[in-house]
Image: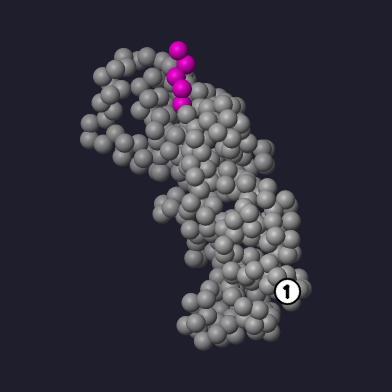
């Protein structure tokens, strides 16, 4: 993914970057940089990938520097959504030297974390080879959901619902407390507006058959923790009436077989809650 990715509006992440800088500056500012770097010195630095991956979070990284030096210039070589090799340049920053050093860790924390999510997503997208879509979940770091879900998009994935208020997802505990699949669906259909999407989680083929009896008005079904043989049978039962989502125990190794069953998409929480940081360095140019 290169040119089709929509950037996040600055207002969505400016507070995150400000808070991270304030946390780092503490009560006395950057003692080390203030003591070792002359005021007014200009410098340039390069952001380099130290391992292969997919870039995400450059705008947050750039903001860490421009908040400290509004005149800072950032020249991007590989933007969000681009794949990079080990040693490849991502961007160059020219700014007040103190701003470069003081903003370095915050910039790299955001860039490494979000690029790690984008890289994990791209790996899973590659594994399914276009046979189905890849989506994330709400298993995100508190306060970082918007940028983590953006990182999933950078990796070629799609987003599941963003919060509790933008779609209906009837899960196993809702079904248990409502008195069954039919009761839960009927109660939702009696209350939800016509523009709200509805998805129902099922754990068994019997639950799926029950859902299909009352599925008018339902948009999607989440097939949870099913083996490929069960998923294939479920897809046949659904017969295109609902969007079929597979979830649970999905890894890069198991994803190809799951994608072959005919499901429309797979969802994986580990894309956001367990993705390894992509190793990115900032090197001052002397």
Residue at point 54%, 30% (across, down): 49
Q: Position of residue 206 (x, y in %)?
A: 64, 82
In this picture, is 176 found above or below 114?
A: below
How packed mark 1 is, by other alpha carbons closer than 10 Å (few <14, some 14-19, many 20 or more), is some
Residue found 40% across the figure and 24% down from its top: 100
In terms of depth relative to the viewer, which is nearer, 127 or 105? Answer: 127
Q: Which residue is drawn at 41% across and 15% down?
A: 42
- Relative to 161, residue 192 above or below: below
Query: Which of the 4 image quadrants contains residue 56?
Result: top right
Q: In this view, does 249 lie to the left or right of 40?
A: right
Quadrant where the image shows the N terminus: top right
- Kindly give the residue lying farthest to the left in the view shown: 27
Q: In this view, does 147 lie above or below 211?
A: above
Magenta segment: 282-286
Characterize the magenta stretch by its predominant secondary structure.
Answer: strand
Horizontal and vertical percent for residue 113? 47, 42
> Is residue 94 toward the left or the right of residue 25 in the image?
right
> Is residue 162 rendered magenta in the image?
no
Residue on which the image places disc 1? 233
């Amino acid at each position: 993914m290169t040119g089709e990715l929509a950037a996040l509006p600055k207002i969505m992440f400016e507070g995150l970057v400000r808070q991270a800088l304030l946390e780092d500056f503490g009560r006395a500012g950057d003692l080390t940089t203030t003591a070792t770097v002359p005021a007014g010195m200009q410098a340039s630095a390069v952001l380099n990938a130290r391992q292969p991956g997919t870039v995400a979070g450059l705008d947050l990284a750039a903001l860490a520097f421009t908040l400290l030096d509004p005149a800072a210039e950032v020249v991007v070589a590989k933007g969000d959504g681009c794949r990079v090799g080990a040693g490849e340049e991502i961007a160059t920053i020219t700014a007040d030297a103190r701003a470069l050093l003081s903003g370095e860790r915050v910039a790299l924390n955001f860039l490494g974390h979000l690029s790690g999510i984008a890289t994990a997503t791209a790996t899973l997208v590659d594994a399914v080879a276009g046979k189905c879509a890849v989506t994330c979940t709400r298993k995100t770091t508190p306060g970082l959901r918007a940028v983590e879900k953006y990182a999933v998009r950078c990796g070629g994935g799609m987003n599941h619902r963003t919060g509790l208020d933008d779609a209906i997802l009837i899960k196993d505990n809702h079904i248990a407390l409502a008195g069954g699949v039919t009761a839960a669906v009927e109660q939702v259909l009696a209350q939800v507006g016509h523009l709200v999407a509805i998805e129902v989680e099922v754990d068994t083929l019997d639950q799926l058959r029950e859902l299909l009896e009352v599925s008018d008005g339902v948009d999607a079904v989440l097939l949870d923790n099913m083996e490929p043989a069960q998923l294939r049978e479920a897809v046949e039962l659904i017969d295109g009436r609902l969007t079929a989502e597979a979830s649970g125990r999905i890894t890069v190794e198991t994803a190809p077989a799951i994608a072959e069953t005919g499901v429309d998409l797979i969802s994986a929480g580990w894309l956001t809650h367990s993705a390894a940081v992509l190793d990115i360095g900032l090197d001052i140019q002397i």
